[in-house]
Image (tube, coloured by chain):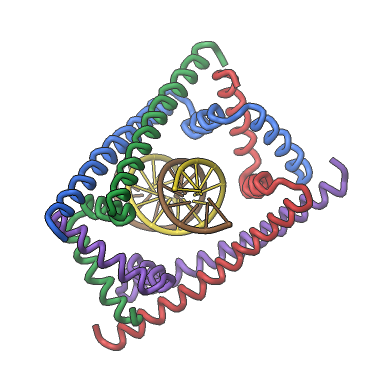
Chain colours: A blue, B green, C red, D purple, E brown, F yellow
Amino acid sequence: MNNTSADQIRSFVERIETLEQQKKDISDDIRSVLQEAKGEGFDPKILKIVVRLRNRNKDDVDNEEALLELYKEAVGL
Amino acid sequence: MNNTSADQIRSFVERIETLEQQKKDISDDIRSVLQEAKGEGFDPKILKIVVRLRNRNKDDVDNEEALLELYKEAVGL
Amino acid sequence: MNNTSADQIRSFVERIETLEQQKKDISDDIRSVLQEAKGEGFDPKILKIVVRLRNRNKDDVDNEEALLELYKEAVGL
Amino acid sequence: MNNTSADQIRSFVERIETLEQQKKDISDDIRSVLQEAKGEGFDPKILKIVVRLRNRNKDDVDNEEALLELYKEAVGL
DNA sequence: GCTCCGCTTCCCGTTC
DNA sequence: GAACGGGAAGCGGAGC
């Protein structure tokens, strides 16, 4: 390996590390918000489910829920 | 549920959504950097491994590698 | 490393490999069943959800669903 | 939903549950083997790495290791 | 269609 | 002994 290649590798690695650190910081922030919510009596797990549902098409979600009800009845739930 | 609780839930959900969006943006940035590296002839997969190794204690990594060599020999690798 | 250690390592590795293969076979079987169900017009994703629900305590599931409804209303879903 | 559909759903769900149970049993067996190995002084984590390596093409693994060494030197590892 | 990445879940170690 | 948090494995979805 020549020097230029090594320099490039170092550069790429450092750029990625910086971004990964930022990502980790944000993950920590999300965790903090969920903890805060929990401290005020809300359920973090359900909050995450709601966030996911809001990212999805409403019709799809409705259809899926309707189907699930049918299947649940079929197995006695 | 009273109005205050609903407001709190909305607030928590929106804060999480904002953070999740930021996280996604950074993930996209990382992907871009890896693509750029690939375009210059480097292996994105190996770059990621290097980033992970740099996050770990050197002695731990060295020990693990030494042990792995022993085990590999034991099974004929 | 002495010979005995190497033998032990080989033995452990082979035992694990055998078990992993069996596990993979069963995963394939599950996938086949889901495919068959899909072929008869059922939704594999919903079937898996039902299986998971049946593994959980009914009261927990009911409580979680009730809570989710509340949160959904709070954010206008 | 008619009775036949409900019967089919029940049947599919039960078949999947049976298979999932078998899979879980095997996972437990694997865990036992790793525990046993640990009890005799071997490192479970490394054993799992060896199992994974044995599943891969030797040339690929060798190439990857060679490349990794180059990159590690480039960043001073 | 396949690989690869991110998410979810599970398991373990720690702490109270 | 139970709950909590961190880490690893398995699964589903996205991107090539």
Residue B71 vs C35, above or below: the answer is below
Left-right relation of F7 to C69: left
Quarter of the image where the N terminus of chain B is located: top right
In the rendered view, tell whether residue B8 sits above or below residue E2.
Answer: above
Does residue E1 appear left or right of residue A16 in this picture? Answer: right
Q: In the rendered image, which quarter contains the C terminus of chain B? A: bottom left
Find residue B20 and report its image quarter: top left
Relative to D56, is C52 above or below?
above
Q: Is residue B64 above or below residue A48?
A: below
- Residue found at the far bottom of this picture: C3
| Rendered residue at 62%/59% (across/down) | D20
Left or right of B23? Residue C36 is right
Image quadrant of residue B30? Answer: top left
Locate residue B8, reporting x and y percent.
46, 17
Residue B45 position within the rendered picture, expressed as x and y whole percent measured from the top left:
33, 55
- Choose between C69 and D67: the one closer to the eye: D67
Residue drawn at the location 62% of the way across and 25% of the way down: C69
Residue in the foreground of this view, choosing between B25 and C53: B25
Query: Residue at 40% across / 34% down in the picture?
Result: B24
Seen at 19% across and 64% down, the residue is B62
Q: Is residue B64 left or right of residue D51?
A: left
* Residue C61 pos. (x, y %): 62, 38
The answer to which of A51 and B33 lies nearer the viewer is: B33
- Return the x and y of residue D13 as percentages of the image width and height: 71, 53
